[in-house]
């Protein structure tokens, strides 16, 4: 077999495996919608309080481990790897898991995609000096993300990727070069931050050559305070945040509704 044929075969095998994984996940998720009220009642009678407590603890641990990389958690994965035979009382277990995160860890489990049942953990602890925990860059990558979110917000919520790269270059972070702190900057921004749902990286229709644009992702919308972000930008430019009328109105409205 020629090298080209082997490459094509390998590519087809990978695509087939990915498709199979996707089908398995869809099947796993479909099982939740097929549960009847009688199955729920039987499950409640079958499992003891101690068993339920252990299962809740297992789900909490599973989500905490998954969240270390800030990758969103799928209900299908929770069902497949942890819930298993407790699937009939998934809703009851996940409600207790939410309470556990709230009361013990000061975290909030949020379903950011109700259609596909995808969750993230956000930190709801009151921060030092009133500043949200998510707004205090604890590592260089968080600072990088913060800059990008600021630019997107100040420019109306959607910006072409060239504006992001040019902004970073002004900060001596060149996406075309390997950075000491971030490594492959472009990969961090367009892959890691996108997978973590902090950013959306979307192809612009009918562009040649192809162009992309950035928007805030679902996790950023849940975690990041636009009002605090605007205050940060105001300090940066030594300007009253209210002088950006449109952004201040949007940030205030978001704060009120959260």
Image (cartoon, grey):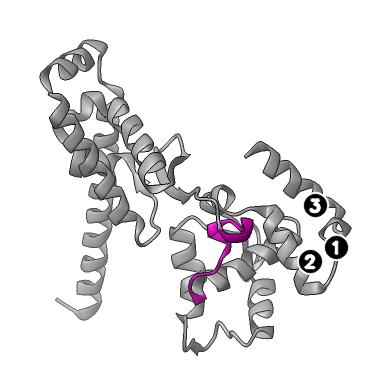
Give the residues in magenta.
128-140
Visible residue check, residue 129: yes
Question: Splitting the image into 4 quarters, where does residue 209 fall?
Answer: bottom right
Classify mark 1: residues with Cα within 10 Å, few (<14), some (14-19) or many (20+): few
In this picture, residue 152 sits left or right of residue 47? right
Quadrant of the drawing holding the N terminus? bottom left
Point out the frontmost of discs 1 and 3: 1
Q: Which mark is residue 248?
A: 3
What residue is rendered at 20% in x and 43% in y?
58
**Going from the N terminus, do you reach mark 2 or mark 3 first?**
2
Horizontal and vertical percent position of residue 93 = 28, 30
> Which residue is disc 2 drawn over?
234
Q: Nearer the viewer, residue 154 or 123?
A: 123
Question: Splitting the image into 4 quarters, where does residue 239 fall?
Answer: bottom right
Q: Nearer the viewer, residue 21 or 137?
A: 137
**Going from the N terminus, do you reach mark 1 or mark 3 first?**
1
Classify mark 2: residues with Cα within 10 Å, few (<14), some (14-19) or many (20+): some
Identify the residue at the far top of this view: 38
Classify mark 3: residues with Cα within 10 Å, few (<14), some (14-19) or many (20+): some
> Which residue is disc 1 drawn over?
240
Identify the residue at the far front of this view: 129
Q: Are marks 2 and 1 in contact (CB under 8 Å)?
A: yes
Horizontal and vertical percent position of residue 29 = 29, 34
Circle 3 SS class: helix
**Going from the N terminus, do you reach mark 2 or mark 1 first?**
2
| Up/down of 78 relative to 229, above or below | above
Cα gap from disc 1 to disc 3, whole angstroms: 10 Å
């Amino acid at each position: 077999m020629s090298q080209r044929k082997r490459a094509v075969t390998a590519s087809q095998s990978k695509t087939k495996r990915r498709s199979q994984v996707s089908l398995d996940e869809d099947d796993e998720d479909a099982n939740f919608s097929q549960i009847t009220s009688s199955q729920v009642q039987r499950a409640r009678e079958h499992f003891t309080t101690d068993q339920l407590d252990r299962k809740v603890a297992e789900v909490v641990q599973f989500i905490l481990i998954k969240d270390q990389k800030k990758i969103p958690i799928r209900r299908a994965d929770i069902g497949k790897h942890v819930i298993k035979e407790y699937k009939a009382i998934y809703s009851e277990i996940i409600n207790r898991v939410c309470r556990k995160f709230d009361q013990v860890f000061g975290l909030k489990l949020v379903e950011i995609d109700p259609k596909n049942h995808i969750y993230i953990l956000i930190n709801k602890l009151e921060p030092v000096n009133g500043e949200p925990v998510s707004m205090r860059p604890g590592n260089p990558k968080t600072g990088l993300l913060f800059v990008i979110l600021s630019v997107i917000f100040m420019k109306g919520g959607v910006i072409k990727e060239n504006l992001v790269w040019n902004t970073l270059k002004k900060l001596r972070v060149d996406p075309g070069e390997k950075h000491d702190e971030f490594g492959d900057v472009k990969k961090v921004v367009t892959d890691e931050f996108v997978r973590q749902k902090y950013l959306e990286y979307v192809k612009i229709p009918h562009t040649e050559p192809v162009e992309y644009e950035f928007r805030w992702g679902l996790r950023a919308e849940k975690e990041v305070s636009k009002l605090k972000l605007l205050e940060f930008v105001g300090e940066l430019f030594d300007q009253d945040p209210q002088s950006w009328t449109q952004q201040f109105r949007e940030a205030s409205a978001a704060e009120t509704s959260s």
